[in-house]
Image (cartoon, coloured by chain):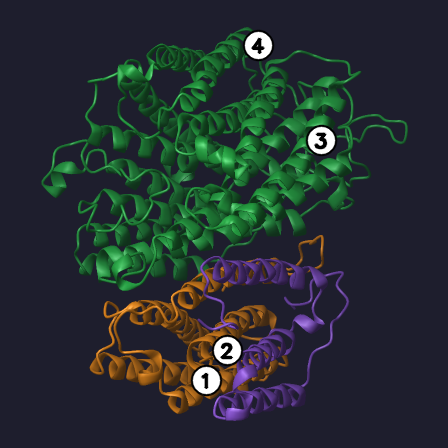
């Protein structure tokens, strides 16, 4: 990410990119809420099966959830490392975050494949539609996040990342934690609530 | 303005002033396209049993007229002023993210071109010309828009065009929120901002919260049309009503997105030409914010005929009536500004006053819609068409024209001709009333909207003819306006820094401003920095020559390249070819990577 | 140093210990969430319980991992505003379509 001059006066004393990113996150709240609301509005209205209770694997998904939560921890440790100039651990934590993200995505792939084998596809029933579009959109966000993290990691390997541009890591973190937070809601609403 | 010339300098521009001009010309072009669509509609409806166009063509005409006017003309015209004026009004050198700004413009242009390409794209889909343009109304109700009932690419063009345009608006939204909150000159407190900038801020918050909802609605439609889902299919247990909810959750804030900037313009124009501060600045600002917030609570008033039930209807009737309050309050403030002022009847002022009068009428018909029993008679008739045109045309368009006449000298360095301007105003004012007032009656007499013709027995032939005459008067007015624009390039009086005696910062710099806007960033000590009031004298304008070198960011190709990725991705869906999407994604992601890593100092 | 804009007071940071603690709490709450659905006794209140727990996790991540607790107010406002709208949207939409969780169907 380019090093925008932080020497500009800002009226609120806040970094422009950080503020823009929080506005973006606010906007994404509306995006995911619309998808989640669609899921909730159509919950229980599938005309044919398979139905959620027949298919959702809560133990498996709990592990996925734990994986994503841990990745958030790693992200925050990555930021702390970069901020104090410890690029060795910065790289390790950045890569670990991306890795856990990939594990999560792998879990999604396994889950989706299972469901398709059990007869649940996008077009089978309302549960299929809403489930796959909601979790698929989330998964796409995770994938973008992984790409973003790996890009940062490569920049770090090239020696182009350091405490001076820690803001870029912070913003990456905001994105990653937001993606985690959305999953917290999805996990509860889709998997846990009966 | 930047001194660089040539196509490349425009394609790579990151200067908010140039981007503002790009938005202006493009929006004007689309306004003319939408206007021609309107004229054809009016010719078709001038008499009963009209034979000018077929029903299928008519459906495309009114769909494209609405979609074009709202997304390609009115919103971008507003955007052109956000772009040009907001940094000047807050005392900044540019917006927070200049390249993102360029990106927004290019995405808008490509989205608009994609949408309008549909008029000519028929042969690519084994159909004639004028056959595959969107035809489901600007609001695209499911399940008419499902593949089963709309098998052709018409709705796909619409859905993809709107998704692309949404991205443009969202990007600009983030940009302007940060700009207005974070880039203000020293001393420019929030409650010293010009009302236009305040209304822009509220508008951007509405944009970033409302557009994601329509993004989802459209995405669900895309899944239904391309990937076999059933989000709006009754047989699968779903309901088309979900579309209406998602659409209007966006659609209602959208109409406030359309009107608030015009209200902002008027709030700046009236004080200048009354030589009096805005009456009740604080109230006007707070009511603008309130309107923005409340606009989230009224959406189902577009669904009174759907059968949501008496409780839902009553609640939304209540909230809708409530939102009329802050709106009405502003009207009193505007009148209070004019009252006792030293009035100079410039064209800009004519349009501003015309806005107030016409918006009152539009607001009144709106309030009648707020009552569900009354609305049941009005909905889907020409009464609603009257309402929307009084608020969109009499409101937004008159307000934006006030802005054009006010700010044109600043943007181009030339004054528009006041004589031609008055002709433009009066012809447009008379024309719009002739065109749209009869529609109240036409609607109540029973003519439904979105019908390609009507029978003579309905008895609305004469009124429709009057309406058509009005439409052509508007066209004549717009022609005069175009002549005025054209002539001003060579015959327009050169504009000084401040042709009007304005109070706000944009008038403290040359017309057009230097590329860096302010040679010295001003320190602001009041709401009316350039005026002399009881409390303070006028500010010192920044010196003509800057004290030292001022860094101005250069241009960049990457916003354009990244923007190009979006219509390419859309083309993939339209043509049902997978590999094309990868080209689009490569352009987008590649563009973004180059953008992120190129050296660029704001 | 990019994250300290000139003029802003140096803001606190949570320590690594705090982060690990928060992560631990998140894990525990997740475990509770999963556990709760298997406890018959709690079935009547399982929905509000789950919603409350996930809201708690949400808040913890936002305040600590996303640093909102230590950041200037405008940032929280820019996030919470749309969040409130979003919540209202979800609740209203569910009410209007008769899909209310709490009352089942």
Question: Foreground mark, 1 or 3?
Answer: 1
- Pinpoint the chain carrying mark 4: B
Could you say where residue B164 lies in the image, as x and y percent from the top left? 36, 48
- Residue visible at 19% across and 60% down? B578
Q: State the SS at label 3.
A: loop
Could you say where residue B575 lies in the image, as x and y percent from the top left? 17, 51
Q: Is residue A100 left or right of residue B261?
A: left
Residue pointed to by mark 3: B504
Q: Which chain is green?
A: B
- Residue visible at 41% across and 63% down? A38
Residue pointed to by mark 2: A184
Q: Which chain is purple?
A: C
Displayed quadrant of residue C4: bottom right
Displayed quadrant of residue B195: top right
Mark positioned earlier in the residue sequence (1 or 2): 1
Q: How many marks?
A: 4
Could you say where residue A76 lies in the image, as x and y percent from the top left? 57, 81
Query: Could you give the CA–CA distance between mark 2 and mark 3, rounded to whole angstroms?
Result: 48 Å
Res. B418 mark = 4
Q: Which chain is orange?
A: A
Question: Foreground mark, 4 or 1?
Answer: 1
Quarter of the image with the N terminus of chain B is top right
Res. A65 mark = 1
């Amino acid at each position: 990410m380019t090093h925008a001059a932080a020497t500009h006066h800002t009226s609120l004393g806040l970094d422009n990119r950080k503020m823009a990113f929080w506005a973006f996150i606010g906007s994404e709240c509306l995006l995911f809420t619309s998808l989640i609301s669609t899921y909730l509005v159509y919950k229980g209205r599938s005309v044919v099966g398979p139905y959620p209770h027949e298919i959702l694997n809560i133990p498996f998904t709990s592990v996925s959830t734990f994986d994503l939560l841990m990745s958030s921890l790693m992200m925050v440790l990555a930021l702390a490392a970069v901020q104090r100039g410890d690029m060795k651990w910065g790289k390790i934590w950045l890569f670990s975050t991306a890795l856990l993200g990939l594990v999560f995505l792998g879990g999604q792939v396994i889950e989706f494949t299972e469901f398709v084998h059990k007869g649940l596809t996008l077009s089978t029933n309302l549960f299929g539609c809403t489930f796959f579009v909601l979790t698929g959109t989330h998964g796409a966000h995770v994938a973008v996040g992984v790409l973003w993290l790996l890009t940062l990691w490569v920049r770090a390997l090239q020696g182009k990342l350091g405490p001076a541009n820690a803001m870029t890591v912070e913003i990456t973190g905001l994105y990653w934690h937001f993606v985690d937070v959305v999953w917290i809601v999805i996990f509860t609403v889709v998997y846990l609530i009966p | 303005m930047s001194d660089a010339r040539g196509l490349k300098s425009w394609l790579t521009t990151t200067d908010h002033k140039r981007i503002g001009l790009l938005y202006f010309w493009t929006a004007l072009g689309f306004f003319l396209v939408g206007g021609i669509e309107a004229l054809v509609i009016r010719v078709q409806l001038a008499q009963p049993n009209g034979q000018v166009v077929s029903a299928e063509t008519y459906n495309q005409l009114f769909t494209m007229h609405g979609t074009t006017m709202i997304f390609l003309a009115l919103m971008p015209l507003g955007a052109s002023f956000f772009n040009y004026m907001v940094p000047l009004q807050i005392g900044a050198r540019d917006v927070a993210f200049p390249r993102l700004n360029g990106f927004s413009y290019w995405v808008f242009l490509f989205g608009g071109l994609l949408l309008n390409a549909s008029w000519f794209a028929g042969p690519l889909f084994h159909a004639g010309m004028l056959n595959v343009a969107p035809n489901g109304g600007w609001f695209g109700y499911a399940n008419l828009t499902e593949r089963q009932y709309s098998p052709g690419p018409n709705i796909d063009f619409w859905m993809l065009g709107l998704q692309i345009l949404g991205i443009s608006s969202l990007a600009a939204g983030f940009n302007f929120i940060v700009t207005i909150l974070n880039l203000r000159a020293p001393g420019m407190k929030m409650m010293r901002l010009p009302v236009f900038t305040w209304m822009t801020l509220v508008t951007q918050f509405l944009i970033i919260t409302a557009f994601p909802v329509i993004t989802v609605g459209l995405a669900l439609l895309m899944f239904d049309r391309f990937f076999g889902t059933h989000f709006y299919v009754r047989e699968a247990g779903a309901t088309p009503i979900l579309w209406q909810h998602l659409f209007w959750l966006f659609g209602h804030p959208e109409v406030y997105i359309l009107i608030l900037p015009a209200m902002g313009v008027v709030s700046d124009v009236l004080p200048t030409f009354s030589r009096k501060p805005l009456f009740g600045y604080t109230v006007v600002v707070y009511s603008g914010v309130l309107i923005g917030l409340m606009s989230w609570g009224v959406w189902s008033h577009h669904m009174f005929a759907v059968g949501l039930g008496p409780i839902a209807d009553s609640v939304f009737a209540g909230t809708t009536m409530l939102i009329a309050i802050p709106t009405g309050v502003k009207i009193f403030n505007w009148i209070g500004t004019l009252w006792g002022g030293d009035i100079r009847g410039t064209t800009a002022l004519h349009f501003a006053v015309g806005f107030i009068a016409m918006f009152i009428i539009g607001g009144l018909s709106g309030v009648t819609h707020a009552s569900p029993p009354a609305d049941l008679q009005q909905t889907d008739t020409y009464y609603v068409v009257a309402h929307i045109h009084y608020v969109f045309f009499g409101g937004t368009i008159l307000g934006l024209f006030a802005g054009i006449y006010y700010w044109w000298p600043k943007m181009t360095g030339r004054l528009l001709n006041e004589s031609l301007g008055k002709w433009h105003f009066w012809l447009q004012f008379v024309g719009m009333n002739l065109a749209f007032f009869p529609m109240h009656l036409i609607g109540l007499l029973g003519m439904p909207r979105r019908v390609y013709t009507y029978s003579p027995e309905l008895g609305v032939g004469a009124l429709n003819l009057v309406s058509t005459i009005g439409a052509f008067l508007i066209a004549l007015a717009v022609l005069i306006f175009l002549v005025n624009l054209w002539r001003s390039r060579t015959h327009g009086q050169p504009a000084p820094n401040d042709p009007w005696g304005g109070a706000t910062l944009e008038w403290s710099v040359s017309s057009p401003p230097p590329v860096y806007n302010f040679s010295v960033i001003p320190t602001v000590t009041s709401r009316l920095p350039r005026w002399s009031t009881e409390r303070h004298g006028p500010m010192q304008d920044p010196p003509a020559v800057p004290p030292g070198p001022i860094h101005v960011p250069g241009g960049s190709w990457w916003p354009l390249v990244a923007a190009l990725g979006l219509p390419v991705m859309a083309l993939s869906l339209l043509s049902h070819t997978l590999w094309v999407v990868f080209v689009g994604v490569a352009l987008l992601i590649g563009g973004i990577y180059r953008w992120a890593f190129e050296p660029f100092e704001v | 140093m990019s994250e300290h804009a000139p003029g802003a007071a140096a803001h606190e940071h949570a320590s690594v210990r705090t982060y690990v603690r928060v992560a631990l709490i998140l894990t525990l709450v997740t475990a509770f969430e999963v556990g709760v659905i298997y406890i018959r006794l709690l079935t009547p209140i399982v929905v509000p319980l789950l919603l409350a727990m996930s809201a708690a996790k949400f808040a913890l991540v936002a305040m600590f991992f996303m640093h909102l607790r230590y950041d200037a107010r405008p940032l929280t406002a820019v996030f919470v505003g749309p969040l409130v709208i979003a919540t209202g949207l979800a609740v209203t939409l569910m009410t209007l379509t008769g899909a209310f969780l709490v009352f089942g169907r």
